């Protein structure tokens, strides 16, 4: 992460009232703390400016402009507002540190662990973000998880699959477009909540603030890599390095301020540390989120992997995985059932990891395993979409009905 240089990031402001252990955070993270804490009041200026123009343009027209600019370039939108041109000036200026060809080359065989990655997404990445009542509040106020945990998980997976695909982040690829749309969805939600009297700005800070947006990289990079190792599916060193590099660029596309954008594992670990130390306490909605993703999504997915006779133990397996991934202390806060099975999962991880690492040292196995993983992913995607009746990719393309969402218009 770059050192903060602007008065905006370093200015003294009253901190959100729900933050904890602020002085301890300043002691442990003397360089990061000032930037991280001040960024509780920062949104995404470029995306927010475009969203401010949406009422004047009309929601449908504005989103069509956005998609056209993603797919054909900003030059294909002759009537684009200055705000959209400014947003794409930043998006089109690829940083010099980005090497997409190298990232794709190193990550060509990540798909061999598709089964494990799906489990880690649900039981580690998503659950880890729910131990923060302020960061979870936008999901509560837009109804996107309790309404349908399966649908929301498919939407997240749609983005992640596209963004991690070979060539997925090239300028006109699907992963690039979905990432930009995720950024604008964040801005639409941010504007809606700031206009909502129910949003307690003094307690929670700006909705989807820069601090919590930066933690997205920890949620979908550091934590998954750690989780994959825990269940015996470790990526090779060059794959891990490419993973961090990919998510650094994704963070750039998502509008994360360079002062908070982690460049490697050590910087992600520091970001995770200050996030966990200062996060607002868990509330009942956080527990409901975890319960929803467990009962509505993870348990049925575990049932797909085991014989019917073992279906009754699927909730215990999910709880064991969640405890291994996020730790007992946070699991206790979230009301995740304790189970001795967690010890078996922890013990099995190194054994499975040794077996898979040995296979990874045999290059002829990588291609077939990757193709098998991709076939599994495609079959799972079709099955889940049929089960939950989901045909769209992100919420901005979801059909009407149900609870209104700011991204739908």
Image (cartoon, rainbow, N blue to C red):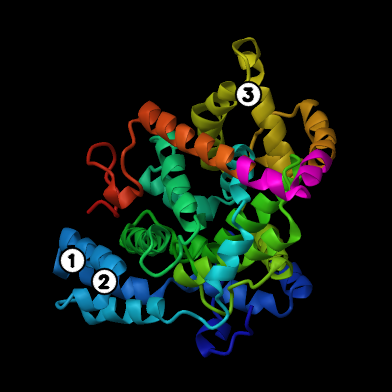
Choose top left, top right, bottom left or bottom right for residue 355: top right
How far apart are labels 2 and 1 at the CA level? 7 Å
Q: Which residues are magenta?
A: 354-368
Quadrant, the C terminus: bottom left
Helix, strand or loop at mark 1: helix
Q: Which residue is mark 3?
A: 315
Residue under numbered circle 2: 52
Residue 269 sits inside the magenta stretch: no
Task: Tell me which corner region of the image, top left, top right, bottom left or bottom right, holds residue 172.
Answer: bottom left
| Image position, residue 246 (x, y; %) | 57, 65
Which residue sits at x=38%, y=35%? Answer: 147
Residue 350: x, y in percent? Answer: 84, 40
Compare residues 42 and 115 and report the one nearer the observer: 115
When asked about the image quadrant of residue 44, the answer is bottom left
Identify the residue at horizontal 23%, vertical 79% (top origin): 75
Q: Is residue 19 visible?
A: no
Residue 402: percent from left, percent from top = 27, 36
Mark closer to the observer (1, 3): 3
- Locate residue 370 relative to residue 184 in the image: left or right: right
Compare marks 2 and 3 and give the one earlier in the sequence. 2
What is the distance, in whole Å, between disc 1 and disc 3 at their CAs?
45 Å
For the residues labelled 2 and 3, say whether their Cβ atoms are less than 8 Å apart: no
């Amino acid at each position: 992460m770059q050192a903060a240089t602007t008065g905006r990031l370093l200015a003294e402001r009253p901190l959100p009232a729900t933050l904890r252990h602020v002085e301890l955070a300043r002691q442990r993270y003397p360089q990061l703390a000032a930037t991280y804490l001040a960024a509780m009041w920062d949104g995404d200026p470029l995306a927010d400016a475009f969203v401010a123009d949406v009422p004047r343009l009309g929601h449908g027209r504005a989103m069509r402009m956005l998609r056209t600019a993603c797919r054909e370039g900003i030059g294909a939108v002759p009537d684009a507002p200055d705000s959209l041109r400014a947003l794409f000036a930043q998006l089109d200026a690829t940083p010099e540190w980005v090497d997409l060809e190298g990232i794709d080359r190193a990550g060509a065989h990540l798909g061999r662990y598709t089964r494990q990655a799906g489990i880690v997404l649900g039981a580690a990445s998503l659950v880890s973000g729910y131990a923060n009542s302020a960061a979870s509040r936008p999901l509560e106020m837009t109804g996107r998880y309790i309404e349908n945990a399966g649908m929301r998980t498919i939407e997240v997976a749609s983005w992640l699959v596209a963004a991690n695909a070979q060539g997925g982040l090239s300028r006109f690829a699907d992963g690039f477009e979905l990432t930009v749309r995720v950024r604008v969805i964040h801005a639409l939600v941010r504007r809606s909540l700031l206009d909502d009297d129910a949003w307690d700005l003094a307690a929670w800070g700006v909705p989807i603030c820069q601090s919590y947006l930066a933690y997205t990289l920890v949620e979908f990079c550091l934590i998954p890599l750690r989780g994959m190792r825990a269940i015996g599916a470790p990526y090779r060193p060059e794959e891990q390095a490419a993973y961090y590099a990919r998510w650094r660029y994704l963070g750039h596309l998502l509008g994360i301020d360079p002062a908070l954008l982690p460049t490697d594992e050590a910087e992600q670990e520091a970001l995770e540390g200050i996030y966990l130390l200062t996060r607002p306490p868990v509330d009942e909605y956080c527990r409901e989120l975890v319960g929803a993703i467990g009962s509505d999504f993870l348990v049925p997915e575990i049932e797909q992997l085991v014989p019917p006779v073992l279906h009754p133990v699927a909730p215990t397996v999910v709880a064991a995985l969640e405890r291994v991934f996020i730790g007992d202390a946070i699991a206790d806060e979230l009301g995740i059932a304790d189970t001795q099975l967690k010890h078996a999962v922890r013990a099995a991880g190194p054994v499975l990891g040794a077996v898979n690492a040995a296979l990874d040292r045999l290059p002829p196995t990588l291609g077939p395993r990757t193709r098998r993983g991709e076939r599994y992913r495609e079959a799972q995607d079709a099955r889940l979409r049929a089960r939950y009746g989901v045909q769209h990719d992100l919420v901005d393309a979801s059909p009407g009905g149900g609870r209104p969402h700011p991204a739908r218009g």
